[in-house]
Amino acid sequence: MALKPERMSELPPERRQKLMTRSMSDISAIYDQVVGIVRDIEKNGDAVILKHYSKHKSDITPADLVVGPDEVAAAYRDLDPAVVEALKKAKENIVRFHRAQLPKEMWSIEIAPGILAGRMTRPMDSAGCYVPGGRAFYPSSVLMTILPAKVAGVKRVIACTPPGPGMTAGAATIVAADLAEADMILKIGGPWAIAAMAFGTEVVPKVDKIVGPGNIYVTAAKMAVFGHVDIDSPAGPSESLIIADAGTNPQFAAIDFLSQVEHDPDAAAILVTDSLKIAQQVCDIIDRELPRLPRREIIERAIEANSAVLVTSSLAESIDVSNEYAPEHLQIMTADPFTVLPRIKHAGSIFLGENAPVPVGDYASGTNHVLPTGQCAKMFSGLSVDDFIKTPTFQYLSKDGLRSLKDTVITLAEAEGLPIHARTIKERF
């Protein structure tokens, strides 16, 4: 394949639409099937999960669903010590960043004389973190989901990850969950994990919120249980947009572009620049690199399906394209990225300058990598401490404060046809 620059001014409407919508998850074809699994677990609990995973272990028991102390110890023995140390360093930065997000425990203001109103911050009681385990193990996602909940003060945090043959979980996943201080690690994946955490079973505790990325079946299950529990934003394949200018290092931009499409055949990478020269250089480097890349087939499919190098007429137009795209990851690789930053409206996480490739946020800079995809950055933010706290409000009124609102409340209550609402005020006078 040969990647070529495409001018935004000449882009056919259908091509533009395809790039903007990329691989947005359409769960309609599988939703009924997933709902069936969810309802079965709601009714029959662990029996459904055990039947499903009997393919991994013929004599499976409920105990096989839980990672025990012996498995944790074995995971530490099996895992490369360098990986353990890297996880510890990443944990340190993630905790530091998320602690800075903690809001005031309580605040109040005087609305008017005798009327005090305020808000408190309270953590959820429990949370469930889903960790993918299909094509690869993602210990970084373990840290990114469990640690914000722990920092927020959630009392019980459990983690679920798909098991492999013999009902085993990856050593890196187990170690990461242990380092993050998960209260329970479960070997359950897909809709079975989501439903079990949403409704609770004899083995799996019910939680208040479920977070973490997953495949289309996980996304469908999360949508099916929403309302019984809270969920984070729907997550699809990884995506990145790079804003470049004439001074961008084309080698850095090309490798960063390729790093995003090595995830998955449905991943997406976009580079937007007002420099035709940079656009062509990036395409040339990508074409030169492709033949020797270890995940070439995946990369080529992702480039062909959802990726592009786009040429605009100006930096302002590049920014407009980015805001329309609303990327999960946004790299600003311009001469002065801090002048571009205030003009960004929609992005999951933003990487400034040539020394901030997306993988630093994926693993160790401290920011969270559980981010909205498929233009959901227009309405959702990345996972944070805020996802695990509630903010109940309160008010106190003196007699004079209530008197100042008496006529207003009575008038509005009676206008809405609620005379006893009005009477609660009248009784006090």
Image: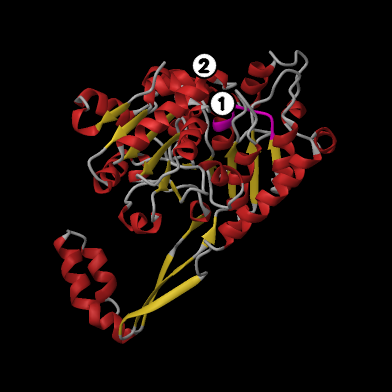
SS label for mark 2 = helix
- Mark yes or no: residue 39 visible: no
Drawn side of residue 92 relative to residue 287, left or right: right
Q: Colour scheme in the image?
A: secondary structure
Q: Which residue is mark 2?
A: 297
Quadrant in which residue 96 is drawn: bottom right
Q: Which kind of residue does numbered mark 1 sit on?
A: Gly
According to the picture, the residue beneath numbered tag 1 turns out to be 190
Of residues 252 and 303, the one drawn nearer to the viewer in this rendering: 252
> Residue visible at 32% across and 51% down?
345
Quadrant of the rendering where the C terminus is positioned: bottom left
Q: Is residue 382 left or right of residue 152?
A: left
Q: Amino acid at mark 2?
A: Glu
- Quarter residue 6 falls in: top left
**Which SS class for mark 1?**
helix
Quadrant containing the N terminus in the rendered view: top left
Whole-percent x and y of residue 364?
61, 48
Q: Residue 230's spot in the image, x, y percent?
A: 47, 43
| Residue depth check, mark 2 versus mark 1: number of the one nearer the observer | 2
Q: Callout 2 environment at 10 Å: few (<14), some (14 to 19), or many (20+)?
A: some
Q: Which residues are magenta?
A: 186-194
Q: How far apart are the two marked residues, 2 and 1, measured between alpha carbons? A: 26 Å
State whether residue 326 appears in this view: yes
**Is residue 94 highlighted in magenta?**
no
Q: Are marks 2 and 1 in contact (CB under 8 Å)?
A: no
